[in-house]
Image (cartoon, rainbow, N blue to C red):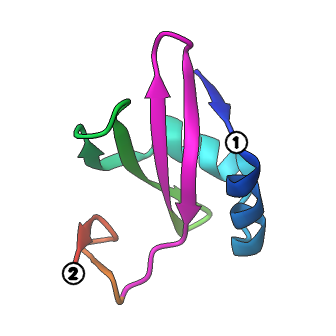
Amino acid sequence: MTVIFPPYVLKRMTERGIGVEEVEYALEFGEMIEFYDDRVPPRRLMLGWVNNRPIHVVGEDDPTAKETIAVTAYEPTIESWTDGFTKRK
């Protein structure tokens, strides 16, 4: 599946020191920790670990186009997440 990076997402990723490869890795190999099926199309929150660094990525899948749109990517904080960054406080 191809990952699409809108300009605003790339800007935030750069500000946060997160690379394209990290996001692609999290979307492909990460653990899905939340699924937002109330959205059209549905979104999923993935947790990926890259070089011992946790990365949360929200992806919006378009199976017809075989694309995933990166909605946001950030490094979760211990202040907001528990259980290895898989559950919200």
- Quarter assignment of residue 86: bottom left
Q: Is residue 62 magenta?
A: yes
Please tell me which residue is depicted at 44% across the width and 45% down the height of the picture.
Answer: 30
Main SS, magenta residues: strand
User: How far from the left and from the top, in percent, is residue 66?
Assistant: 55, 15
Please tell me which residue is depicted at 46% across the width and 36% down the height of the picture.
Answer: 60
At label 2, the amino acid type is Lys
Q: Earlier in the sequence, mark 2 or mark 1?
A: 1
Residue 89 numbered tag: 2
User: Element type at marker 1?
Assistant: loop
**Disc 2/disc 1 C-alpha distance (Å):** 29 Å
User: How far from the left and from the top, in percent, is residue 17?
Assistant: 74, 70
Q: Which residues are magenta?
A: 56-78
Please give the residue where the numbered disc 1 appears in the rendered image. Answer: 5
User: Element type at marker 2?
Assistant: loop
At label 1, the amino acid type is Phe
Q: Is residue 22 above or below residue 13?
A: above
